[in-house]
Each structure stands twice: as C-alpha cells, then as structure tokens.
Image (tube, helix red, strand yellow):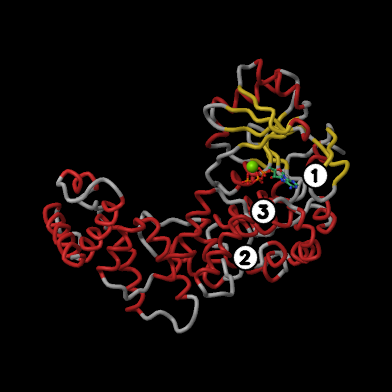
Amino acid sequence: MTALEPTGRLQPYGIMVADDTARVFAAIAQHGGKARYVGGIVRDALLKRDLVDVDIACDLAPEETQTALEKAGIRVLPTGLKHGTITALTDAGTYEITTLRVDVETDGRHAEVAFTDSWLADAKRRDFTFNAIYCDPDGTVYDPFDGETDLREGRVRFIGVAENRIAEDYLRILRFFRFQAWFGRPPVDPVGAEACRKGAHGLIDISAERIRDEMFKLLRSRSPAGTVGDMIGFGILPVILPQLARTDCLRIMQWLDSTALADPAITPDPLRRLAALFQTGDDGTDDNLAAAERLARALRLSNEQTDRFAAMVAQAPLIDPEMSADNIRRDLYRIGPDAFRDAVLLAWSTRAAVPPRCSRQENEQWQSLIDAARNWQPVKLPIQGRDILAAGLAPAGPKIGELLKQAEEYWLDHGFEPDQNELKTYIVGLLSAGAQETE
Ligand code: ATP
Ligand code: MG
C-alpha cells in the first residue's frame, strides 16, 4: 500500500490560495505529475499560523518538475537536484519542491537517495510525525502517522525507531529539540530524548553552520529556556556547546524580551538570547571576551553578529542599575541606544537570575535604563577638526585629534551643553596652559 488515504481536511489560506501557488500546482499537473503540500506549511496551517515558505512533495523527477515549471514561465533554481529538490520562485513566495524519495544509504550526515513513486515511503523517511502530513491544494489532508494528534498534544515523536532515525542523520537531534521548543508541551517525549542522549556523540561531525542555524531557530521560539535545559540535561549541549549553560539567565531574558517590557524596540532576539545563555565560568572581562569570540568562531557567526555579540559581553559588566544620569548619557553617546539596550538586557538578566530577587525599586532602576535608550536623541560633538584648523588653533596633524578628544571629554562632563564657541575657548585655554607648562 503505497498511496495515502485521506484523513481530514483543512481550509487553505494565505500563500496556499495565491494565484502563483495555483500556477505551480497547475504546471506540475499539466506535465502529468502529482504534487502535495508537506512539512512546515501543512503543520503551520493546521495550527493556523502565518504561512511563509512552501514545501511541496511531487512524483515527477526533479528535472521534469523543472521543465514543467519553466514551461509555465516560473523561475526555478536547481538547489538540490541530487537530493531531488528544486526551488521555484514567484512573487508570492518560495517553493521547495522535492521528488518523492527514500534514503538508500546514510552515514549520519549525508544521504544517498533514490526516487520513488510511493507516498508512504516518502513519509517514512521524514523525521517527525507532524512533519509528514500531506495536503492537496484543495485542503484534503493525508496524515499517515497521526501527526495531527501529536501536534495537538504537543508531542514531538520520531517516525520509526528513534535511535535508528538519529543514526541516519544526527542533525535530527537538534531538530527534535527545536520542534519541541516551538510545538512541544513539556515534558519532552522521553523515548525521543533518550535516543538523542545516546546519539549525542554523532553531533560532533555536524557542520558548525547547521548547528548555528538550528540553535538560532530554537532561540527564536517564544520561550526556549525549558527546552535548552532539556538539551543540557540530556547531554546534547555539553557535547557541542558546553559554554551555553545559563538557562537561568535565558529564562529572565526571554521574559524581558517577549513579555515584561512594553518597548517596541525590544523583541525576542536570538543573538541576545545566546549571549544570556553563554557562560564562561570566568568573570575576568578579557577572558570572557576571548571566550565570546571563540564561541562566535565556533558558530561561524557573521562579522556583524560577532561584533554585536562581543560588544554585549564586553558592555554588560559595565552596566549598573544605579548608574548616574550622566553616565547613562555617556554610554548612550559612546555605543548608541541599540548596543546600550543589549547590554542593559544582558546585565539585567544576569543580575535577576541570581538571588536575592530584584526589589521593586531595583527593577524600576533597570527599567529606567531601558527608558533612557528609548528617549535618547542622538547628539554630535559641535566641533570638528576642520573648525580647529580654520580657527588657527593648531596645524594639521595629530595635535588636532588630541585636542578634539579633550574637547569631547569636556563636552561630555558638561552634559553636552557647551557649543562650538565655548569649546574653542576651552581649547584656547588648554593650549595656553600647555604653553605655560613648556616655558
Ligand atoms: P521550517 O521550514 O519551519 O523550519 P520544516 O518542517 O518545513 O520547518 P524543512 O527543513 O523546511 O523543515 O523541511 C521540510 C520537511 O522535510 C520537514 O517537515 C520534514 O518532513 C523533512 N525533513 C527536513 N529535514 C529533515 C531531516 N533532517 N530528516 C528527515 N526529514 C527531514
Ligand atoms: Mg520548511
């Protein structure tokens, strides 16, 4: 029995009812093929979530699908021809179209695949029951492993024998916990989690980029701390990223960034959450910074991400809820409101994670730092090198930079008040004091 029996219906919406989507399905049908939604889009439609990317399973060979789509004037990228996947691009969105397939040989990282005409065989090679639900364009649902029940009950369940499925592809361990964070209800499925524990050693060979992508997807879920705790408890993170241990800080961070603070500039941010979770076991700032850079390299973060991550780790220890208005302004001027906000959130979650509990007054102090970032109006030092040059205060050269630095300090010490004239007067004063000293 290789066909699938209908098990239910769903009401198509969003990208499912876009004209472009109808064109994709029609092109395949015209070529004699059969295509169905599968994977994330069906899962998300059953949960009535926003639908973004479209996964489609199809019984045509990938080259044929490509021809069919191109004939219909649809743009196609041969993204993974070897594995049977092509990507169709339309104005409405992106469609990952994969030929029905089975894995014939696996080594924990790569699979050699064979195409098949069996929908059931295709379903069996997928990872979790709720990721193997298919759906016709009209909304007819085929759910061979009762993934709908698992989805409704918040259970992430491997298709087949979990241990075997993990040995075929160790990345499934990370997918298991990622889907647990998004769709699971605690406690985590003990059979799957135990199988993950047994297979954790296999993660050593998984590429850093894939680990990073999975970790970021996990950290984007609403409240990942509990699942991250499971990943530590079941020995997953200790194998790949032992420096990620502060679930207590992450718990506060996720509460701050998604619930506690009504500030439009603050939204859940995976990199900031990663920083909360990051623990070196060393308070020395330099060592901390070196460890942060090692983590950034280990996860192949982009340069921009690395800089932001390192800045958070370096700045957070300098934040004090009792800092003066003057110091707050200086920091805001020096690093800008975004980096300041990052540092405050990180410092706040680190502080609040350890007893004693923050008093109401202390929480208000932290809140006022966040407010300061929101209300910050950028200011610019009202004097530049060329003003000093034009006033004949110093010749072109390094002296100008020195004078500017001193003028900036003076300006900061006086609450950004001094204007250009006052700063010139200050510089004249500096120069004549300097001249007297050298006399
Ligand atoms: P999302 O796109 O929201 O991250 P998804 O479930 O669509 O979630 P994809 O990576 O797009 O995930 O994969 C599409 C489908 O392909 C999955 O739903 C699953 O059926 C199958 N799949 C993806 N990766 C694996 C894997 N490593 N092992 C087995 N099946 C997989
Ligand atoms: Mg998908």
Residue 414, x across and y down, in percent: 18, 65
Tell me if label 1 and label 3 are in contact, CB under 8 Å: no
Report whether 433 appears left or right of 53: left
Q: 163 and 404: which one is in front?
A: 404
Q: Quadrant of residue 427?
A: bottom left
Which amino acid is tagged 2?
Val
Q: Which mark sits nearer the N-terminus, 2 or 3?
A: 3
- Rounded to the nearest angstrom, the CA distance separating label 2 from label 3 is 14 Å
Distance from mark 3 CB to nearest ligand 1 atom below 8 Å: no
Residue lying at the far front of the rendered structure: 439
Which amino acid is tagged 1?
His
Q: Nearer the viewer, mark 1 or mark 2?
A: 1
Residue 191, x across and y down, in percent: 78, 64
Q: Quadrant of residue 433?
A: bottom left
Residue under label 3: 211
Residue at horizontal 63 percent and vertical 36 percent from the top = 139
Residue at horizontal 42 percent and vertical 64 percent from the top = 343
Residue under label 1: 110
Report whether 41 appears left or right of 144: left
Give the quadrant of the N terminus. top right
Residue 106, x across and y down, in percent: 85, 46
Which type of secondary structure does the marked residue at label 2 adopt?
Answer: helix
Which amino acid is tagged 3?
Ile
- Rounded to the nearest angstrom, the CA distance separating label 1 from label 3 is 15 Å
Tell me if label 1 and label 2 are in contact, CB under 8 Å: no
* Image disc number at residue 228: 2
Q: Which mark sits nearer the N-terminus, 1 or 3?
A: 1
Tell me if label 2 and label 3 are in contact, CB under 8 Å: no
Residue at horizontal 79 percent and vertical 58 percent from the top = 202
- Rounded to the nearest angstrom, the CA distance separating label 1 from label 2 is 26 Å
